[in-house]
């Protein structure tokens, strides 16, 4: 019996659901395609002071240089070795970033591409970001090294060798995802090689991993790799801390593979979240915000403590992956801010904010033919993230995480952390409000008429600064002020044509 209890205790500790963010911080940001030198600066000058918990970085492992099209963002999902050497920077720059971010309490999470190497069709003569030789035709990656024995060819039963049907779990895991050479993760050599790569990163000081293409790996194979991982670096983490794991599994229902198969390994991306929230905020398919009253598990999502949630990601903001047209992105800024505001106010899941770059969209028959375009660059070299006098970013970096409404809602989430979902109100349509215990309250007007209502906020009496229309600075407020009376009630008036038709107040925005 004792032995049994011990085993289940170990089993529980193993599964890594805890992001190891500094206490009081509750969200991470994906700085998509940023250079390591810029991320280090951003941790120090912005993310730490504004209460961000961590950064998801683009894959740091050496990748094939794709020239047709010219240097697409997706070349980074075609590894050729595990050298830390990409357009974002080299190993020294990576280490410097991890050290400096950790020193100001901001964690680094690595996007780990371990299901596959490059596409089978990529030519052997194509360069790589660190000069390592590779030959996809003969499945030779001497810089790892991997050879033909380390790939799944024998296991895959489809004619093309590619995944042809998502209704067959064997194909999805043992065949090639869009021709990408599929690693044989049942082999101990492959597992150990991947674990060495991840351990190298752990020893440098990263706090965890996004496991790319997890759906395409058997949960047991992922577990076997995780079982080989070191504890986090004790320079910054309590001894015995295991890396945070969130697995990329797109489960919108209707396929052979479900998210729940992966809960034993760690958290899982909840793709239903952004797809549904986009549909509601766009008011498509008869949806309305009033229906958000039971948002979360009530909508058929996975348990909150297993979910990694986001409004959009680097794939579905440009039509890759899943979610479709309903996904809200910075291109629809007004609706996007409401979506992200709702996510950050609501207690469900562990939240990730997207931070993007702008590209030239060009739609042909409803599809963006420029969805491949890589980050702002000059002759292929990624451009610096410059900061404008008004704190926004230059050089076509969008920096959604620096938008006042989003940055202030990241802080709102920190302030209300641990508080229950309370005081829901709706008008039966698209005017809704809810609180987080006695710490915060948010009101949305996504209807075509003005909202005017006196609502129970749950907050102590006082004058509060709305952190959507402005900022509290000292004892004054640059935005709308809301006065909460001694019974906790306050009057809200939000025009449907307001720049941002929502208001948020919290304990730290009290004047
Ligand atoms: C193409 C054809 C193949 C053909 C091949 C011939 O599609 O049928 O056999 O050419 O050479 C790129 C190209 C793709 C090309 C492939 C191989 O876009 O057209 O195949 O390279 O050369 C990103 C991009 C992909 C890109 C890939 C590798 O989205 O377009 O493929 O990087 O560069 C599913 C998965 C989910 C996945 C999602 C996009 O379940 O796991 O699709 N999401 C993750 C990442 C995503 C990344 C990958 C997985 C792969 O978030 O960014 O794909 O690592 O839903
Ligand atoms: Ca696979």
Image (tube, grey):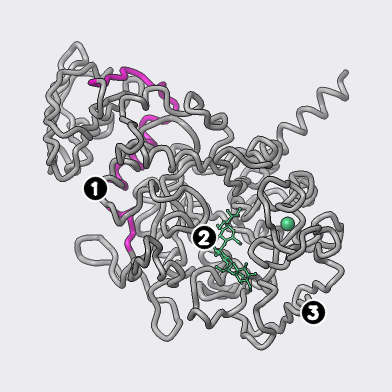
Q: Nearer the viewer, mark 2 or mark 3?
A: 3
In the rendered image, residue 402 lying in the magenta stretch gets the answer yes
Instruction: State how far apart marks 1 and 2 are (Cα).
Output: 26 Å
Instruction: State how far apart marks 1 and 3 are (Cα).
Output: 50 Å
Q: Looking at the picture, how far across and down is residue 411, in whole percent?
A: 34, 40
Q: Quadrant of residue 341?
A: top left
Dot 2 corresponds to which residue?
57
Q: Is mark 3 within 8 Å of ligand 1?
A: no
Residue at horizontal 53 percent and vertical 74 percent from the top: 89
- State which tag comes first along the sequence, 2 or 3: 2
Is 456 left, or right, of 41 in this rendering? left
Residue contact at pointers 1 and 2, CB within 8 angstroms: no
Dot 3 corresponds to which residue?
138
Secondary structure found at label 1: helix
Q: Quadrant of ligand 1?
A: bottom right
Secondary structure found at label 3: loop
Is 473 left, or right, of 87 in this rendering? left
Q: Nearer the viewer, mark 1 or mark 3?
A: 3
Q: Quadrant of the N terminus?
A: top right
Dot 1 corresponds to which residue?
334
- State which tag comes first along the sequence, 1 or 3: 3
């Amino acid at each position: 019996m004792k032995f049994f209890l011990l085993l289940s205790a170990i089993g529980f500790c193993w599964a890594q659901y805890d992001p190891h963010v500094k206490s009081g911080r509750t969200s991470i940001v994906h700085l998509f395609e940023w250079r390591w030198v810029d991320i280090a600066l951003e941790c120090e000058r912005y993310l730490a002071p504004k209460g961000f918990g961590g950064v998801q970085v683009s894959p740091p492992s050496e990748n094939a240089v794709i020239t047709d099209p010219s240097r697409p963002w997706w070349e980074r999902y075609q590894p050729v070795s595990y050298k830390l050497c990409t357009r974002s920077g080299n190993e020294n720059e990576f280490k410097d970033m991890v050290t400096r971010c950790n020193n100001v309490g901001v964690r680094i999470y690595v996007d780990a591409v371990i299901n596959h190497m490059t596409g089978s069709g990529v030519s052997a003569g194509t360069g790589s970001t660190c000069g390592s030789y590779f030959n996809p035709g003969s499945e030779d990656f001497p810089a790892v090294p991997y050879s033909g024995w380390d790939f799944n060819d024998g296991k895959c039963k489809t004619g093309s060798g590619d995944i042809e049907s998502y209704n067959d779990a064997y194909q999805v895991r043992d065949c090639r995802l869009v021709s990408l050479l599929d690693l044989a993760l049942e082999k101990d050599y492959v597992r150990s090689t991947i674990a060495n790569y991840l351990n190298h990163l752990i020893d440098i000081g990263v706090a965890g991993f996004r496991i790319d293409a997890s759906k395409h790996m058997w949960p047991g194979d992922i577990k076997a790799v995780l079982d080989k991982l070191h504890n986090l670096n004790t320079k910054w983490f309590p001894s015995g801390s295991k890396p945070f794991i969130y697995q990329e599994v797109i489960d919108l229902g209707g396929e052979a593979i479900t998210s729940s198969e992966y809960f034993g390994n760690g958290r899982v991306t909840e793709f239903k979240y952004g797809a549904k929230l986009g549909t509601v905020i766009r008011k498509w398919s008869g949806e309305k915000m009033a229906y958000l009253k039971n948002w979360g598990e009530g909508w058929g999502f996975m348990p909150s403590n297993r979910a990694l949630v986001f409004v959009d990601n680097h794939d579905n903001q440009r039509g890759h992956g899943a979610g479709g047209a309903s996904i809200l992105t910075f291109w629809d800024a007004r609706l996007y801010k409401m979506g992200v505001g709702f996510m950050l106010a609501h207690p469900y899941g562990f939240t990730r904010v997207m931070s993007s770059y702008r590209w030239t969209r060009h739609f042909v028959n409803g599809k963006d033919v420029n969805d491949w375009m890589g980050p702002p660059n000059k002759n292929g070299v990624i451009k610096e993230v410059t900061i404008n006098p008004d704190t926004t970013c230059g050089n076509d970096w969008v920096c959604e995480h620096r938008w006042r409404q989003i940055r202030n809602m990241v802080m709102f989430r920190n302030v209300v952390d641990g508080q229950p979902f309370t005081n829901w109100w709706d008008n039966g349509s698209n005017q809704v409000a809810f609180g987080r215990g006695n710490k915060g309250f948010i009101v949305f007007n996504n209807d075509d008429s003005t909202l005017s209502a006196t609502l129970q906020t749950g907050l102590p009496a006082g004058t509060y600064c709305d952190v959507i229309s402005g900022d509290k600075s000292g004892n004054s407020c640059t935005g709308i002020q809301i006065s909460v009376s001694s019974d906790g009630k306050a009057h809200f008036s939000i025009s449907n044509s307001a720049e941002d038709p929502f208001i948020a107040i919290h304990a730290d925005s009290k004047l």
